[in-house]
Amino acid sequence: MKRGARGQLFVVSLALIGTVGAASAVLVDHRVRLELTERSRSQLVAEARLVQAALEAAPDADALVRTVRQAELATGASVTLFSREGEPREPFQLERSAHRGASRGMTTTALDAVRDGEVRVLEHASDADGPASLAVALRYPQSGALRGIVQIEAPLERVEASVRKLRLGIALAAGVGLAIAVAMSGLASQLMTRQLRALVKKARRVSKGKEERISLEMEGELGKLAGSFNRITDDLHKVEAKLGRERARLHTVLEAMEEAVLALDESGQLRLANAAALEALGLTEHPGVRPLRELTPVTPMIDLAARSVAGTAATAELDLPTTPPRRYLVRATPLETVGGAVLVMHDVSELRRVEAMRRDFVANVSHELRTPVSVIEANAETLLAGGLDDPEAARTFLEAIVRSSERLARLISDLLDLSRIEAGHYAIHIEPIPVAEALADTVTEIGVHAEEQGIVIEVEADAALAVAADGAALEHVLLNLLDNALKYTPSGGHVVLRATGREARIRLEIDDDGPGVAPEHRERVFERFYRVDDGRSRDVGGTGLGLSIVKHLVETMGGAVGVEASRQGGACFWVELPRA
């Protein structure tokens, strides 16, 4: 590229110099030729006048001959005398023809003009009669009776010789000038291309980020070019910085979005995906530019994307094979200006789960309320229908009404407690509570039921351990968990209450040797009204809200709750709370 620029400059300069030189040479040659021809014509006319005057003074033919010879010797031209009819006079023509060649005649028009007293200048081109020449014809005497016509003819060899000498001079001057011009042009192109190479080198360094600006001490157009390049570079840096900020802002927004965002080009290939989208597709990193159909096996999603790329907005709710499987509400919007589409995927798995829980909750509450209300209604109707007349039967009916009303009261109480906890209206006062003392109080309060069932309760706790918790809430949690363990522990079984310290946390465990909880149920046992074994759960009683209340109370106190397999083969419910 460097040699090309230099060569182009040199060729352009050479062509310009050659064109100007050739045009100048042609113009000068033409002008000089005209000037010399005109000068020769004027000189020949003057000489013809002198010969005319000399001929007028000649008294006889011999004097005419002498005058002609003297004129030829003086002028170096051919002098010919013509009769009034335009015919060369024989003595003079023969005399002249012997050493100068035949004379060229005149046309009738020229002859008439000369007879009338005009001075006729004739130009003869080179032909068989001789080389190119210039002739002047005029009458003599100038006034009075016409005696004849005199013609002075001189070859144009002097003009041609002068022109040839001039051409040679011009050629020599042009050659020297061209050589100098070529040298200067080469030098100028060398200097210019050197500056251009330096400019290109600096521009490359700027493009690679090695320099910020072009610092060249240039003048003229190249200096202006360097300045313009610097201004363009500054503008590009500003635009690049602005685009970088916008790109960083967009990246931050996309990565912070919980919604999965996919951007497809006009051919349906993935161009952009945020972290949520990669997670939804089961990817750990951006796969690069690849068709969406290669990244997911979900056909409805592929069809949805294809319709949006084709220009049709669409919405669908799809299940993606993630771990665990999740449900997404996908909105596909076509990009009309640049082509392609954007897919925004909202994870509605939790929303759908909550909706299902709400439906189950309403159904379960309705069922739980209907059972005691039905019992109360049935027994009351029986009493009103005559059961009061039988005191023993009436007592049985009344006891059933009391049990159902107590169950109904417990259910309503648990619902109110759960509602207050979820709404944040349950007052919590965190204070240090000795763990061993709290476990002992729980066993004392519920120990009578354990003795009735023949269940042994053991407590394993260090007296130095203390948790930061609310006393009433912790008591409620422990009573619910212990009561739950006693319900599912067979007669003659064991329940162990254990407390261990784990750095900044205290772990409380209620370990029984009952049937346990299968792994697939452990995540859901803390949901409202969820029952692992619906039939057995109703046999042992309970509202189905106890574990849900436990979870909410523990989380309100900054702790965590869970269930795992027991060392004794049953279930082990554990609670972790902050150490006091």
Image (cartoon, rainbow, N blue to C red):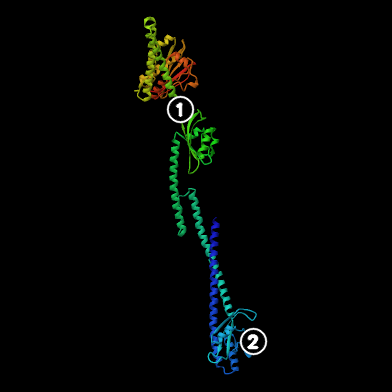
For the N terminus, give its image quadrant: bottom right
Say the numbered circle drawn on residue 367: none
Q: Position of residue 434 (x, y in %)?
A: 37, 19
Q: Position of residue 53 (x, y in %)?
A: 54, 90
User: Furthest-bottom residue in view?
Assistant: 59
The residue carrying mark 2 is: 97
Tell which of 228 and 381 is nearer to you: 381
Tell which of 214 and 136 is nearer to you: 136
Tell which of 559 and 60 is nearer to you: 60
Q: In which quarter of the view is residue 77 placed? A: bottom right
Answer yes or no: is residue 347 visible: yes
Which residue is painted at 55% across and 36% down in the image?
Answer: 293
Seen in the picture, residue 201 relative to 381 is either above or below; the reply is: below
Seen in the picture, residue 91 relative to 438 is either above or below; the reply is: below
Given this view, does label 1 or label 2 mark the residue nearer the observer? 1
The residue carrying mark 1 is: 352
Q: Secondary structure at mark 1?
A: helix
Seen in the picture, residue 424 relative to 133 is either above or below; the reply is: above
Seen in the picture, residue 336 relative to 419 is either above or below; the reply is: below
Q: Secondary structure at mark 2?
A: helix
Mark positioned earlier in the residue sequence (1 or 2): 2
Q: Position of residue 29 (x, y in %)?
A: 55, 74
Tell which of 33 and 397 is nearer to you: 397
Quote the CA–CA distance across marks 1 and 2.
Answer: 133 Å
Check disc 1: other Cα within 10 Å, few if <14, some if 14-19, many if 20+.
few
Residue type, label 1: Arg
Residue type, label 2: Ser
For the C terminus, give its image quadrant: top left
Which residue is painted at 46% across and 30% down in the image?
Answer: 348
